[in-house]
Amino acid sequence: MSTTTFTKKTLGLDTVEPAVTPPPAGAGATFARKPKLASTKSKKRDIPEGLWTKCPKCSTMIFDKELDENLKVCSKCGQHFAIGARERINALVETCSFEEMDAELSSVDALKFTGVAAYADKLQEYQKKTKLKDAVVTGIGRVDGHRVALGVMDFDFLGGSMGSVVGEKLTRLIEAATEKGLPLVIISTSGGARMYEGMFSLMQMAKTCGALAYHAKQPLPYVSVLTNPTYAGVMASYASVGDLILAEPGAMIGFAGPRVIKDTTQAELPAGFQTAEFLLDHGLIDAIVPRKEIKERLGFYLEFLTERMKNGAALG
């Protein structure tokens, strides 16, 4: 087989590329240096802490400003977060109508209690942290058109524990309500009696209930509102003797905690044991009221109770 060959034809215009040679040394030639490109590595943006909160129930990340505007309630699942006493009072009473009582009353370390930390040091620490003198704020204000004696506990102050000052402030509030003929509202959140004060803390259970008995004889209404958590000596005294007992959704309410009860009885506890919903089904509380509805509902209940007691007094 013959092989075909091809010959490249030129038109006589062959182009020869010029040789590239370096400039002679010492010729003074300069070269512009190629600028370096900026690094394209992305920088992580610093996000300040305290802007977002993760809901423990539905795991939604909630913008803190949105959470505050919604009274510390998750807009997705309705989870009720803890709320301070001052915040709750501001959301509940009419503007500029709250007159605080016994604001400077403060606990003392009567037993000279020492342990991992001294009681006196703990008091100073929590007073600085919460800007409160103790675990309750009391006073007289107007709620949905009704002038009421109002006491609000704060769990952030030593777990809302009831010591001498908490018991004394609430007793003075109850006595003021009795003297002025006002309905009484106490919003509770507490781990129980303040054992740093020993027997002095337990005495507050009888003292507050005694004052409430005189208040009931007038007759004047008392509405107890239970929030998460309400336990032990508080639940075993004034929190459980209201003419009407309300609770926030999901609030844990009881005397001893579920773990203690389970270990003591060696028995399986029912599902949802000690939640507000469980206790409503079993008759311990009268209604569950979401935080955003409490102001309006309190106004409705106070109207009903006040009118009923007036009619009862007229008949009796």
Image (spheres, rainbow, N blue to C red):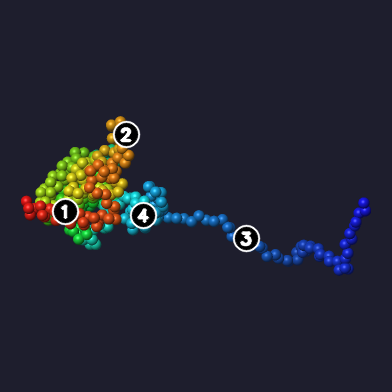
Q: Which residue is mark 2?
A: 268
Q: CA distance from mark 4 to mark 1?
A: 32 Å
Q: Residue at x 42, y 55 (%)?
A: 48
Q: Is residue 249 visible?
A: yes
Which residue is more in the foreground, 98 or 29? Answer: 98
Q: Residue at x 41, y 51 (%)?
A: 60
Q: Residues within 10 Å of mark 4 (few under 14, many from 20)?
A: some
Q: Which residue is mark 1?
A: 305
Inspect the image, locate mark 2, and give the three-letter code of the amino acid beneath it. Answer: Glu
Image-based side of 167 in relation to 291, left or right: left
Circle nearer the N terminus (4, 1): 4
Q: Which residue is mark 4?
A: 75
Which residue appears at 28% of the width and 43% of the height? Answer: 278
Going from N to C along the chain, the mark reached first, 3 or 4, is: 3
Q: How many C-alpha atoms fall within 10 Å of the one at disc 1: few (<14), some, or many (≥20)?
A: some
Camera-near label (3 vs 4) is: 4
Whichever of callouts 1 and 2 sits on the residue coming sooner in the sequence is: 2
